[in-house]
Image (tube, rainbow, N blue to C red):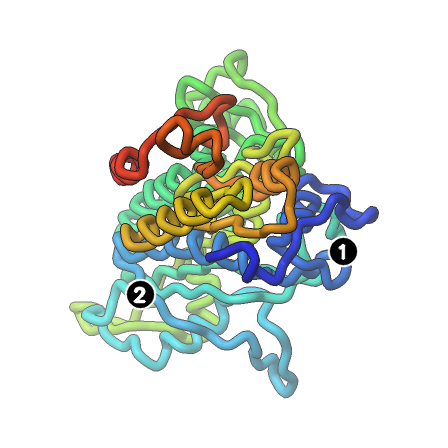
Amino acid sequence: MKQSQLFTKTRKEAPKDEESKNAELLIKGGFIHKEMAGVYSYLPLGLKVLKNIEGIIRSEMDAIGGTEMRTSVIQSNGTEIGLSFTNEEAYSNIMKQYVSSYKDLPIYPYDFKNIFRNETRSKSGIMRGREFYWKALYSFSRDEAQHEEFYEKSKQAYKNIFQKAGIGHLTYMTFASGGSFSKFSHEFQTVTGAGEDTIYIDESKGIAVNKEVYTDEVLADLGIDKEKLVEQRAVEVGNIFSLSTKFSEPFDLTYTDEAGEQKLVVMGSYGIGLGRLMGTIVEVLSDDNGIIWPESVAPFRVHILELGDSEEVLKEAETLYAALASAGIETLYDDRMEMSAGEKFADADLLGMPYRVVVSARSLKENGVEVKKRTEEKGQIMTQDELLHFLKTKE
């Protein structure tokens, strides 16, 4: 995409009522637009990030047997209708129409959708809003053994998701309250000072315990030495729960087993907030100059900066842009003639694409373009062919 065709513009300041780093940077970069407290619209750049995160999650859910569908935002509540707050009831009601025999199970449906939360503590940007864009998967199993088999697979799938999203090194599977149906549920908590939870991390095991269940008894159960734990602030980016028959029983969601007996379906719930994950990435992967997007979720891998208006520079920049497009490498091309070099560099740092490529009279004099990774201080001169090879080997 040519930046001159992008209707959004960067801003020097974020709204004064924003307290969170993620909202400040995303608004300044033109990724999101604030509608009101806790309510944001995703602009073109922000939507591209959200879709990339969605793709990572979809890939991992499909790999463990998930089947994507789409449930309605509007749900019935007796004689009234309302906005979806969660999805257990809706999925149970749907599955009742299709489950009758043990041969129909297991089923692992999921969807991506906006749900209504009306969060009153909406001070954390897109990490905690009044509406919530999430992925929710529900498992429907014959018994606890079949449920546990899928539950363990989901743990690894979630670890894969956060690793691919660039925050795996900061994210811990965290033991939390399991409610009425299991001793524990499992949250995935990312360490950040912007978090609202307190967790205790065992670095040697790569796991953590939420403060809400932190007792000596829980630590004897998990085999964790109390003296090894490190206290940290963290934000919950995903969770998985065993639901047993809490929702299948009231909906009479049953099946006939091999012996001809009626049994209740055993359920589990697996959620990830995509906006919250996006906001968390910005919180933990940014510097004083702006956002640092991981390649897997960045709206564009490469940001070309055209400096100077000589015919030679313009021709080289256009040729490079076309070559990257032909190679399938998503590229943002800063072709804005009215912007100074300093303004273009500042915008590039704020927007945070993984690779910045500068085409200038100086670079052409050295027979190439200057390539710099967002996380590095200095760039290097490469020819067009060298750049293409470099980017292909990094895929």
Q: Of residues 216 and 287, which is closer to you in this image? A: 287
Compared to 267, does 281 lie above or below? above
Q: Is residue 337 visible?
A: yes
In the depicted structure, whether residue 380 falls above or below residue 137: above
Question: In the image, residue 164 lies at what x, y percent?
Answer: 38, 41
Amino acid under disc 1:
Thr
The image position of residue 153, as x and y in percent, is 29, 46
Q: Secondary structure at mark 2?
A: strand
Where, by quadrant of the figure, is residue 259 drawn? bottom left
Q: To which quarter of the image does residue 285 belong?
A: top right
Residue at 26% x, 38% y: name it: 385
Near-viewer residue (288 or 358): 358
Instruction: Count neighbours of disc 1 (C-alpha within 10 A) and say few if under 14, some if 14 to 19, many if 20 or more.
Output: few
Q: CA distance from mark 1 to mark 2?
A: 33 Å
The kind of secondary structure element at disc 1 is: loop
Mark linked to residue 67: 2
Which one is nearer the viewer's eye here, 319 or 48? 319
User: Residue 389: image x %, image y %?
Assistant: 25, 36
Q: Which residue in the rendered view is the most extreme toward the left?
A: 258
Disc nearer the start of the sequence (1/2):
2
Crowdedness near tag 2: few (<14), some (14–19) or many (≥20) residues, C-alpha within 10 Å: some
Left or right side of 367 for 289: right
Residue sitting farthest toward the top: 227
Residue 225, compared with residue 303, is above or below; it is: above
Q: Does residue 294 lie above or below 154 as drawn?
A: above
Residue type at tag 2: Thr
Residue denoted by label 1: 120
